[in-house]
Amino acid sequence: MTIYHYIECGLDNVFVEGLEPLVDDNGEEVIRIPRIAQLHAEIAVGIILQDGSISGSELRFLRSEMGMTQSELARVVHRDKQSIGRWERNEAEMEPNAEIVIRGLAIERLKLKADASIEDHSRRSIPTAGLEEIRISAANETYRLIRNAA
């Protein structure tokens, strides 16, 4: 089974298992990713349910998937847009209370199937040393979160 490192989503920690390479007209191997919206929803669930703080690139991914600008997200978490930018660039640590709100907001706005309470988000929103891998299985053009494991 092939494992594809899906960096095109803007994240370095996403791996999709089961995408088979195809050969294009020039004889080059390429990966076809069907149903990208479904894949991105599963990535969002992986981010939200991971233990440890959301990274800057993960925050940017979630914000973009929610269709929000930095200013719009800043209004929701009662910060200025510069704070959101600093969090996204990893120049400042995201405040835990803001992270808890963002996790819940992403579930709500993206209509995700992620059963998690505010208390669950609170337990997960703790600083960690590195990014957890987000592994997703691709089978029959559907995606399923396998695990979050470093």
Image (cartoon, helix red, strand yellow):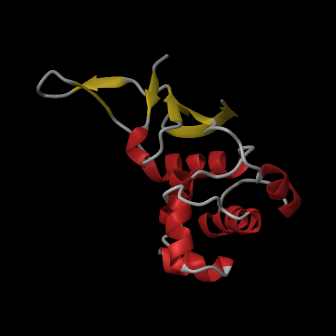
Q: Position of residue 112 (x, y in %)?
A: 66, 58
Q: How many marks?
A: 0
Q: Residue 28 vs residue 13: left or right?
A: left
Q: In the rendering, at what x and y percent does residue 95 appear?
A: 71, 65
Residue at figure coordinates x 46%, y 19% from the top left: 2
* 47 sits to left or right of 85: right
**Does residue 89 show up?**
yes
Q: Residue furthest front?
A: 91
User: Residue extending furthest right?
Assistant: 119
Residue 42, horizontal then vertical, whole percent: 59, 47
Res. 116 visible in picture: no
| 7 in relation to 45, above or below | above
71 w.r.t. 132: above or below: below
Looking at this view, is 101 or 81 the one in front? Answer: 81
Compared to residue 104, the image places residue 120 above or below, namely above
**In the image, what residue occupies the spot 55% across and 69% down?**
84
